[in-house]
């Protein structure tokens, strides 16, 4: 290993390189495709846009079933809104990749670990910042148990 390589290695990395960003882009695009498909299914479920249901043949006197259908539609609507928020977060992550700011914690300014980004590719906070947000000690194993 040359002296320059050792010097570069000793410096803390401030951003992911283009190859790593491409790897994250592929992960995000796969998740985005699945999320959009799931959103489409949820939207169909609460808008009755699917013509293969039994709305035209079901009796109208079953009040309890009607109540359940309304509750189910409301739940699907909430799930769809949550899914749309997830899609927006993934799209924002793609923008950060284009800007080469992807993977940088918005609180600490440090790189978010690769492991975290592979699991939660739309993350904008490192574990350290997330723990600070919820007042969790950064290393709970070293905390003494106090009565």
Image (tube, rainbow, N blue to C red):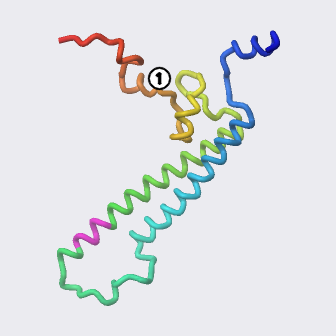
Q: Residue at x 55, y 49 (%)?
A: 88
Quadrant where the N terminus sits is top right
Q: Which residues are magenta?
A: 67-72
Secondary structure mainly formed by the magenta segment: helix
- Comparing 136 with 75, the one in front is 136
Say which quarter of the image contains residue 67: bottom left
Left or right of 9 on screen, residue 143 = left
Quadrant of the image for the C terminus?
top left
Which of the 4 image quarters holds residue 122?
Answer: top right
Q: Is residue 89 above or below residue 65?
A: above
Residue at the image point whose x is 71% and y is 42% from the top: 22
Asked if residue 130 is among those painted magenta in the image, a careful observer would answer: no
Give the labeled residue for mark 1.
128
Looking at the image, is 4 positioned above or below residue 21? above
Q: How many marks?
A: 1
Q: Residue at x 28, y 72 (%)?
A: 69
Quadrant of the rendered image containing residue 73: bottom left
Locate residue 21, reporting x and y percent: 69, 38
User: Residue at image x 68%, y 39%?
Assistant: 97
Question: Is 60 on the left-hand or right-hand side of 1?
Answer: left
Query: Residue 5, position in %: x, y?
Result: 78, 16
Query: Would you say 105 lies left or right of 13 here?
Result: left
* Residue 95 screen position, x and y as percent: 66, 43
Q: Residue furthest bottom?
A: 57
Vertical order, 118 against 78 (above or below): above
Residue 68 sits inside the magenta stretch: yes
The answer to whether residue 86 is above or below residue 12 is below
Q: Dot 1: what SS?
A: helix
> Crowding near pointer 1: few (<14 within 10 Å), some, many (20+)?
some
Q: Does residue 35 appear left or right of residue 13 in this picture? A: left
């Amino acid at each position: 290993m040359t002296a320059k390589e050792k010097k570069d290695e000793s410096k803390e990395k401030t951003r992911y390189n283009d190859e790593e960003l491409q790897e994250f882009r592929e992960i995000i695009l796969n998740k985005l495709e699945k999320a959009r498909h799931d959103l489409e299914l949820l939207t169909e479920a609460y808008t009755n846009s699917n013509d293969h249901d039994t709305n035209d043949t079901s009796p109208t006197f079953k009040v309890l079933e009607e109540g359940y259908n309304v509750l189910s539609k409301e739940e699907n609507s909430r799930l769809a809104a949550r899914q749309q928020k997830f899609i927006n977060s993934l799209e924002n992550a793609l923008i950060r990749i284009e800007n080469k700011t992807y993977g940088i914690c918005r609180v600490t300014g440090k790189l978010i670990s690769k492991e975290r980004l592979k699991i939660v590719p739309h993350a904008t906070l490192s574990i350290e910042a997330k723990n600070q947000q919820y007042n969790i000690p950064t290393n709970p194993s070293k905390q003494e148990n106090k009565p």
